[in-house]
Image (spheres, grey):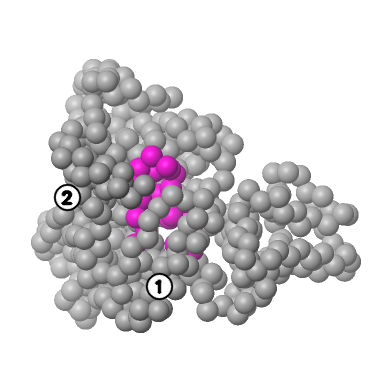
């Protein structure tokens, strides 16, 4: 097996690059994978068993050899337990920016090397220390400098569940579901078993059988070294069985509580989507990755019932029909199956006052002269990039109008031009385009063609 793998890797390294040989190979900046399960699940949704995925774990603290080994084994066991085919890579003793740079430059072997960096959206960018904000922004530059495409995912409630799934949480010896109603219901599993979203665990009490769509088994995805308490709502001392799915609260063994909605967010890319739409806003020509990734997702069994809707910009208002016909022909040549194609033509209109106010409130802290230089948005920058800013604000209004009810929105990521846009202004653009919207995946290719007309 070793000799075969080594020989294949050498042969693959001598194979020339071609668009027909393209595979999205992901470097997922997730830290320890159990801390951000939705991020790892999204990467697995794209790669499955047919492409390379490396989960990057960056730790600022220097760890001993024994601690590094234990951490690596824990990461690998979690991935195997969740049935995810991926490798884990680590960089310890570095900050986030240096660790990410090291992993971007060094991970992989020959042609088995990442070409797409997948990371989570920094939801606390407005309140985080300036050094953290700039480091996050610089990692984007590092990826583009090394010819990697970039994908950023934002989901409601964030991705980081590290405090709940922390390895130093007090062991509970099993997964516990405790009903506070008249009947005491406890469910336990052995200490070495990992529960999955497709487990047959059923914690419903005999006198309250919620319908299958509210079955709580799809939510219990933590490893069984954690304890969860399930508390049912009461009214006048009596349980309300019909509302159990809305009132259940989960408490981890370290005391942190999770609502049912939060647990759903942890498995958002693992559960089956019954119906809905997968909206693609293909705004720039980046080589085709912005359309390829959602197409791959739409081909997975869990997302097969979601219709692929494509939105593209119309450059010439008086030739709208011609541009729509050209885009349809292009997608047909690429063999992309979609349910609808919409050409957006009013992108240049001025944004509404309430949208402008939202943006002004976001950047108010950073336009203050008392802010540090590295986290300051100068007046010159605001004036120079005013047209681009209005474009992002207008995109927000169009997204709220057309894609508010989508299951997933995939959108072209604005290019963070080095030296022309500052970190807080760039993050404010992403904030206005993704706030109060469904899960949003920003994608920007490296201008390498990933789609071809030829079979």
Q: Is residue 46 magenta?
A: yes
Which is nearer the eye, 129 or 201? 201
Q: Is residue 455 among the parts visible in the rendering?
A: yes
Q: Is residue 238 magenta?
A: no
Q: Which residue is mark 2?
A: 147
Which image quadrant is residue 419 in? bottom left
Q: Is residue 36 among the parts visible in the rendering?
A: no
Other-residue count near label 2 (Cα within 10 Å), few / some / many at <14 / 14–19 / ≥20: some
Q: Along the polypeptide, which appears first: circle 1 or circle 2?
A: 1
Task: Specify the label residue 69 is tagged with.
Answer: 1
Residue at 26% from the left image edge and 75% from the top image edge: 94
Where disc 2 sits, the SS reads loop
Q: Which residues are magenta?
A: 33-56
Residue at 51% from the left image edge and 32% from the top image edge: 304
Which is nearer the eye, 107 or 398? 107
In percent of width and height, residue 53 lies at 36, 50
* Whether residue 451 is situated above or below residue 364 in the rendered picture: above
In percent of width and height, residue 157 lies at 49, 61
Where disc 1 sits, the SS reads helix
Other-residue count near label 1 (Cα within 10 Å), few / some / many at <14 / 14–19 / ≥20: few
């Amino acid at each position: 097996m070793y000799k075969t793998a080594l020989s294949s890797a050498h042969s693959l390294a001598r194979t020339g690059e071609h668009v027909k040989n393209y595979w999205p190979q992901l470097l997922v900046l997730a830290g320890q994978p159990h801390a951000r399960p939705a991020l790892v699940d999204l990467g697995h949704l794209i790669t499955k068993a047919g492409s390379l995925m490396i989960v990057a774990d960056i730790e600022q603290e220097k760890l001993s050899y024994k601690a590094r080994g234990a951490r690596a084994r824990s990461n690998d066991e979690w991935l195997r337990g969740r049935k995810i085919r991926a490798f884990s890579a680590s960089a310890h003793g570095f900050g986030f920016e240096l660790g990410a740079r090291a992993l971007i430059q060094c991970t992989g072997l020959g042609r088995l090397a990442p070409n797409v960096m997948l990371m989570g959206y920094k939801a606390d960018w407005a309140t985080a220390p300036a050094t953290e904000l700039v480091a996050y922004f610089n990692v984007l530059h590092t990826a583009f400098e090394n010819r990697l495409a970039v994908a950023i995912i934002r989901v409601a409630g964030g991705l980081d569940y590290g405090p709940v799934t922390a390895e130093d949480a007090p062991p509970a010896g099993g997964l516990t579901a405790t009903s506070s109603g008249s009947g005491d219901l406890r469910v336990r599993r052995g200490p070495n078993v990992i529960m999955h979203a497709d487990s047959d665990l059923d914690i419903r009490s005999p006198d309250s059988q919620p319908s299958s769509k509210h079955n709580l088994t799809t939510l219990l995805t933590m490893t069984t070294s954690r304890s969860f308490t399930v508390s049912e709502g009461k009214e006048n001392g009596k349980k309300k069985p019909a509302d159990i799915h809305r009132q259940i609260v989960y408490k981890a063994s370290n005391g942190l509580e999770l609502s049912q909605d939060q647990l759903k967010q942890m498995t958002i890319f693992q559960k089956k989507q019954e119906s809905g739409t997968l909206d693609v806003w293909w705004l720039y020509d980046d080589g085709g990755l912005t359309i390829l990734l959602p197409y791959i997702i739409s081909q997975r069994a869990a997302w097969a019932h979601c219709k692929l809707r494509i939105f593209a910009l119309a450059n010439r208002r008086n030739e709208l029909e011609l541009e729509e016909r050209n885009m349809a022909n292009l997608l047909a040549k690429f063999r992309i199956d979609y349910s609808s194609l919409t050409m957006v033509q009013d992108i240049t209109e001025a944004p509404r006052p309430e949208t402008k106010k939202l943006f002004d409130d976001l950047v108010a802290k950073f336009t203050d002269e008392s802010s540090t230089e590295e986290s300051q948005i100068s007046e010159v920058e605001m004036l120079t990039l005013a047209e681009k800013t209005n474009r992002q604000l207008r995109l927000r209004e169009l997204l709220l109008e057309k894609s508010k009810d989508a299951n997933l929105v995939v959108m072209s990521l604005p290019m963070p031009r080095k030296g022309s846009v500052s970190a807080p202004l760039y993050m404010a653009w992403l904030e206005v385009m993704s706030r109060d919207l469904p899960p949003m995946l920003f994608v920007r290719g490296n201008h390498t063609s990933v789609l071809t007309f030829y079979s």
